Image (cartoon, coloured by chain):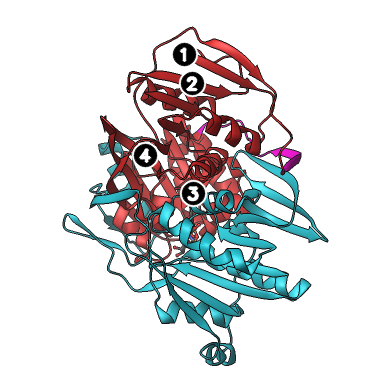
Chain colours: A cyan, B red
């Protein structure tokens, strides 16, 4: 099976912080959270059906993050460098580079922790003319037939389609494996192909501001929980919320 | 100016139509319900087939395509943009259109950032929220039979629990720190005593099913605005905070006094969530 998995290298969302009136996004890089679930699902498909997993990433080509994906079991990574990537540029770059791989399935996650548009997998599916199933919670493939449960928040939808196709997965689908030391060592020998892609972005960023709500941040710490609750109730009464 | 609006959710369809009306041109709606009174023209579709809806929207060559923000809307918006090779901006909280140019604000960085973007028309966007109300119109109606798509819907299971967290005054959120599905009853008893409702973090709602899935609070679930939000055993990752930012008062109960939720809480009670519920209940009973 020709398996392709898209992943994005992003600033660690737990380290992105509001500093004064700025959002400091200059945090350590990592593979975006649910993209690891997409990688895990790709590797499981390979373990079941054989074939190859090609990882594809657009934007940062941070080696440490790419090696994380390789150590998990991705066979090869295509890292695409672009200027000003928006959804359009990223999708075009991916479509351009995966066409010749003739993929049976392309996996993405439902949303990254930085731009979080949910639009990329859908965009790519149209550029390649493939069917698309979003927000997959569980995936079953038999022969050419694909059955998936989609988590739609207020309902779960079961759908059927056939390969080749594009899917996006949520964090519920699996638990990403933690690579062994040996796998991490070996990942440095796996191929990383760096390519450039040139296209004019359609959406331009003007400004990034933090969303600030000032909270009281009062810590109530007592050895006796009774006392702590008494204090809290006093506070809540004076706030007029109970 | 021709705007096409679509949403699987009636509430979002109305919001998207309100935004579309503000551009002053023709508003074309797509829905599976006849009960849509705020567009100039309404296409009533016979099924929620994504291939069919994407084709229908694309065939109308709109200047602006607006969808809501539920998951199906987002999938369709992304595909329409891809099919027509248009710019796409999701989670739009406000926008301004001038001639062929549009300036938009959206949330990013898992809800921590507000980003201002610029693009040209035509454009696809998903609307996060708006206070705008659409005017009532008498649309001309056309029924459309969509072709059979490549993805067939074979089942649907509601996760609805009949509680509306979005309008509740007091919400208690349970996180992984509550420990087990059985323990959620303590949160429920407390909610009952306070006249509130229980929701949960994504792992608890969508993965562990300790609370019904439609009560997931956060970036990819519900955005709530209660008077009082009590987070029991929730660490406070940005994706959860994105859903509770508009709460008046936020209380967190956590065994870890350095839990990241402190940044976004008014009060952090250091302690076990179950003990807290029990004591709180008894105190409220004594009132
Ligand atoms: C794209 C994306 C979208 C997401 N969308 C959402 C969303 O909409 N909503 C959401 O909630 N999450 C969302 N998440 C997940 C989010 O990042 C966190 O993983 C999640 O919110 C953590 O849930 P939690 O706080 O319940 O669990 P944990 O992070 O495991 O936290 C448990 C907390 O409980 C405390 N604790 C443990 N035992 C006790 C005890 N006995 N008493 C009191 N406290 C205790 C611990 O100290 C810890 O702070 C999303 C993630 C991604 C990547």
Q: Nearer the viewer, mark 2 or mark 3?
A: 2
The percent position of residue A55, horizontal first and vertical second, equals 56, 72
Residue located beneath label 3 in the image: A119
**Share a chain, discs 2 and 1?**
yes
Residue closest to the far top: B138
Q: Position of residue B228 (x, y in %)?
A: 37, 39
Q: Are marks 2 and 1 in contact (CB under 8 Å)?
A: yes
B161 is within the stretch colored magenta: yes
Chain letter of disc 4 in the image: B
- Residue B129 lies in the magenta stretch: no
Picture quarter with the N terminus of chain A: bottom right
Q: Nearer the viewer, mark 4 or mark 1?
A: 1
Badge 3, how many Cα within 10 Å: few under 14, some, many 20+? many
Chain for numbered disc 1: B
Work out whether disc 4 and disc 2 sit on a shared chain.
yes
Occupied quadrant, residue A28: bottom left
> What crowding class fits label 1: few (fewer than 14 Cα within 10 Å), some (14-19), or many (20 or more)?
some
Name the image quarter holding residue B57. Answer: top right
Q: Label 1: which residue?
A: B40
Give the residues in magenta. B151-164
Please determine if labels 2 and 3 lie on a single subunit: no
Write down the residue under mark 2. B28
Tag shown at residue B92: 4
- Residues marked 4 and 3 touching at CB (< 8 Å): no
Residue B259 placed where, x, y %?
37, 64
């Amino acid at each position: 099976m020709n398996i392709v998995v898209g992943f994005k290298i992003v600033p660690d969302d737990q380290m992105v912080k509001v500093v004064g009136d700025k959002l400091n996004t200059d945090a350590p890089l990592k593979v975006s959270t649910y993209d690891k679930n997409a990688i895990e699902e790709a590797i499981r498909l390979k373990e079941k059906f054989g074939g190859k997993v090609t990882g594809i990433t657009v934007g940062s080509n941070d080696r440490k993050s790419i090696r994380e994906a390789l150590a998990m079991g991705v066979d090869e990574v295509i890292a695409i460098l672009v200027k000003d990537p928006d959804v359009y540029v990223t999708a075009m770059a991916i479509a351009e580079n995966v066409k010749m791989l003739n993929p049976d399935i392309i996996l993405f996650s439902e949303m990254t922790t930085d731009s979080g548009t949910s639009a990329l997998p859908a965009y790519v599916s149209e550029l390649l003319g493939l069917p698309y199933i979003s927000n997959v919670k569980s995936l079953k493939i038999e022969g050419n037939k694909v059955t998936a449960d989609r988590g739609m928040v207020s309902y779960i939808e079961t759908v059927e389609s056939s390969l080749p196709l594009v899917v996006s997965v949520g964090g519920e689908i699996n638990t990403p494996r933690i690579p062994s030391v040996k796998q991490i060592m070996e990942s440095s020998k796996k191929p990383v192909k760096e390519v450039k892609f040139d296209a004019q972005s359609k959406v331009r960023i003007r400004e990034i501001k933090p969303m600030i709500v000032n909270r009281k941040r009062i810590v109530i710490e007592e050895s006796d929980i009774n006392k702590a609750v008494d204090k809290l109730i006093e506070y809540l009464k004076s706030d007029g919320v109970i | 100016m021709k705007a096409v609006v679509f949403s699987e959710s009636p509430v979002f369809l109305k919001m998207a139509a309100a935004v579309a009306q503000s551009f002053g041109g023709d508003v074309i709606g797509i829905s599976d319900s006849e009960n849509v009174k705020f567009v100039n023209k309404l296409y009533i579709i016979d099924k929620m087939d994504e291939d069919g809806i994407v084709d229908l929207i694309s065939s109308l060559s709109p200047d602006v395509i607006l969808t809501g923000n539920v998951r199906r809307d987002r999938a369709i918006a992304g595909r329409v943009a891809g099919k027509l090779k248009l710019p796409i901006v999701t989670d739009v909280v406000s926008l301004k259109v001038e001639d062929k140019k549009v300036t938009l604000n959206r949330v990013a960085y898992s809800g921590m950032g507000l980003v201002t973007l610029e693009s040209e028309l035509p454009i696809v966007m998903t609307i996060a929220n708006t206070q705008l109300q659409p005017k009532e119109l008498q649309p001309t109606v056309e029924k459309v039979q969509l072709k059979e798509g490549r993805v067939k819907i074979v089942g649907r299971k509601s996760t609805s629990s009949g509680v509306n967290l979005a309008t509740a005054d007091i919400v208690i959120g349970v996180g992984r720190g509550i420990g087990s599905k059985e323990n959620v009853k303590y949160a429920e008893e407390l909610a009952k005593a306070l006249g509130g409702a229980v929701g949960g973090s994504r792992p608890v709602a969508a993965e562990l099913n300790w609370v019904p899935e439609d009560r997931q609070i956060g970036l990819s679930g519900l955005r709530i605005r209660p008077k009082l939000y009590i987070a029991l055993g929730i660490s406070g990752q940005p994706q959860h905070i994105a859903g509770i930012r508009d709460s008046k008062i936020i209380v967190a109960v956590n065994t870890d006094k350095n839990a990241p939720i402190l940044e976004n809480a008014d009060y952090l009670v250091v302690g076990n969530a179950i003990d807290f519920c029990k004591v709180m209940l008894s105190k409220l009973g004594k009132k």
